[in-house]
Amino acid sequence: MATLTLTAKQIIELVKQLSVPDQAQVLEALLSEPWGKWLELSHYGKQQVRQVAAERGRDWDSMTEEEREDFICEVINED
């Protein structure tokens, strides 16, 4: 098999040409290698925030980005 030598900048430009789902797949593959724990924590965090929202009668997945930010501020600033 031939080896192709590319710079990081060239690789980034190639990845940018992929569809968004394919870019996400590349990112997830990269994150699962040396930062597997980070990916695991990220999935755990997503589950936890959905649970906290549900406990407060909210649906995390149907919230807008602004609603999510407001919700997080509410949770963080609770007494």
Image: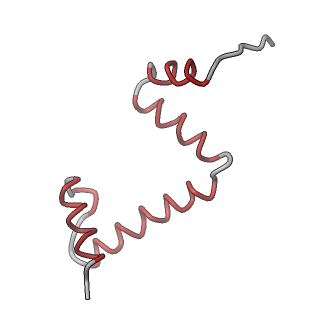
Query: With 49 as the anchor, is 5 left or right in this view?
Result: right
In the image, farthest residue toward the bottom:
79
User: What residue is rendered at 49% in x and 19% in y?
Assistant: 13
User: What residue is rendered at 49% in x and 59% in y?
Assistant: 43
Task: Give the position of the N terminus as an image quadrant.
Answer: top right
| Residue 48 locus on image (x, y percent) | 41, 70
Q: How many marks?
A: 0
Q: Nearer the viewer, residue 10 or 39?
A: 10
In the image, farthest residue toward the top:
2
| Residue 14 locus on image (x, y percent) | 52, 18
In the image, farthest residue toward the right:
1
Query: With 59 as the anchor, is 45 left or right in this view?
Result: right
Whether residue 12 is situated above or below residue 3 in the rendered picture: below
Q: Nearer the viewer, residue 78 or 27?
A: 78
Whether residue 55 is situated above or below residue 49 in the rendered picture: below
| Residue 30 locus on image (x, y percent) | 60, 40
Task: Give the position of the C terminus as an image quadrant.
Answer: bottom left
- Quarter holding residue 62: bottom left
User: What residue is rendered at 60% in x and 25% in y?
Assistant: 8
| Residue 17 locus on image (x, y percent) | 44, 19
Colour option used: secondary structure
